[in-house]
Amino acid sequence: MRYLTLLLFAFTCTALSAQTEGTPSYCEEGPSTYGEAGVPGGATAPSLPKFSTTPTTEYKVQVAILRYTDPSEYPFHPTLVARYRPCEQVWVVESRESFTDREEAVALQKTLEEAGYGDSYITDLVAYQ
């Protein structure tokens, strides 16, 4: 009976440690803003530097979000790439390029639908030029 209890304890510890593997430590930390961090010996952080960039909206086409699946097991269209999100522990399969014109993203979406990716959608992102 003692060996069974010891074996059950070892199995539980192994299972719990396996659940936390693979996620970086920053996934467990809550988000903080720049001003909250502060400067040692000072009250607040200095203001962020200003750059002469302009934000622009760009578009990507996403076709899949894979959980518990390795994308290397599947052949994908050459215009797609898989990107791993460690905090969510998922693979996002999306277009390699981002498009400044939404019509180009819609055209790629139609091409992918014809190739068999029926449930693709367009995501917005902010880029700086």
Image: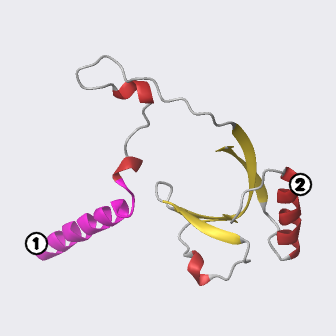
In what element is the residue under mark 2? helix
Look at the image and tell me in which quarter the C terminus lies.
Answer: top right
Q: Which residue is mark 2?
A: 103
Q: Is residue 28 above or below residue 40?
A: below
Q: Which residue is mark 1?
A: 2
In the picture provided, is 48 more to the left or to the right than 77? Answer: left
Q: Amino acid at mark 1?
A: Arg
Residue at screen point 45% across, 23% down: 47
Residue at screen point 33% across, 25% down: 38
Colour scheme shown: secondary structure
Front-lying residue, 85 or 119: 85
For residue 48: magenta? no
Residue 110 horizontal/vertical position (percent): 88, 66
Instruction: State which region is magenta.
Output: 1-24
Residue at screen point 30% across, 25% down: 39
Front-lying residue, 10 or 112: 112
